[in-house]
Image (cartoon, grey):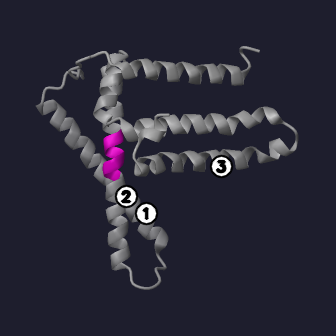
Amino acid sequence: MYLSTLNTKIIISILKPTLISTLFSLIIILPSLLLNNTRLFYLPFKIFITVLLLAYIAQTIPFYRLSKILRLFHIPAIFILTLDLTLKYIVILGDTITNLLISLKLRSIGKNNFKYQSLASISGTTFLKSQIYTKETYHAMICRCFDENYTPVIKHKFKLKYIWHTIVIIIYLLFYFFSEGYFL
């Protein structure tokens, strides 16, 4: 229901990884289905629901709001900080690797007989960059007197959509418990 209200590009970006992961899990359990083990047929459906929900959250909720939500559930501040820094540096190091691969591609003309050496140098450069980024982050946190307090300002207002979110979560939980056989 939520998915149908979104933009077409966002719907495609949500459904693409969802369908790929579901198809992959279906291919993996296909031999089991051929041997009459139909209990595992729930697995691709569960993967579909899980990846769909995660992709929906990733596409519709900005990361800063996700940090606020985690703080609302009293998740320790150091965990939120670690998650925040990890995700940001994964993106930064991914961009670094992409730029290194593009520069290598631009410098290479014809056949490259030293592909493994190039891969090792890209890995080494990325490792050195990560060490530099780590030291810079540490020194920046010391300069700003970081005291392991990671408290964003939360202004909480009750909205009607919270009721719908709760209903959808209850429906998903009921489906999960029925599919696992808890209510049989």
Q: State how far apart marks 2 and 1 are (Cα).
A: 6 Å
In the image, what residue type sits under mark 3? Leu
Image location of residue 97, percent across then percent down = 36, 59
Q: Which stretch did the figure color magenta?
A: 87-93
How far across and down, in percent of the image, does residue 59 sit? 39, 41
Is 100 above or below relative to 106?
above
Give the main secondary structure of the magenta stretch: helix
Q: Residues within 10 Å of mark 2 (few under 14, many from 20)?
A: few
Given residues 110 and 21, the one toward you in this image is 21
Which residue position is annotated with label 2?
124
- Relative to the observer, which residue lies in front, 14 or 54? 14
> Residue at left 81%, top 47%?
31
Picture mark count: 3
Task: Give left or right: position of 118 versus 133.
Answer: right
- The mark found on residue 120 in the picture is 1
The residue wearing badge 3 is 23
Mark 2 or 3: the one toward you: 3
- Where does residue 33 sit, x and y in percent of width and height? 82, 42
Residue at horizontal 42 percent and vertical 35 percent from the top? 57
Of callouts 1 and 3, the N-terminal one:
3
Q: Tell which tag, 1 or 3, sits nearer the viewer.
A: 3
Crowding at dot 1, Cα within 10 Å, few <14 / some 14-19 / many 20+, comes out as few
Q: Which of marks 3 and 2 precedes in the sequence? A: 3
Kindly tell me whether residue 19 is visible in this rendering: yes
Which amino acid, mark 2?
Gly
Residue closest to the far bottom? 110
Q: Residue at x 22, y 23 (%)?
A: 152
Asked whether residue 10 is drawn in magenta, I would say: no
> What SS does tag 2 mark?
helix
The answer to whether marks 2 and 1 mark residues whose Cβ atoms lie closer than 8 Å is yes
Q: Position of residue 66 (x, y in %)?
A: 34, 30
Q: Quadrant of residue 159?
A: top left
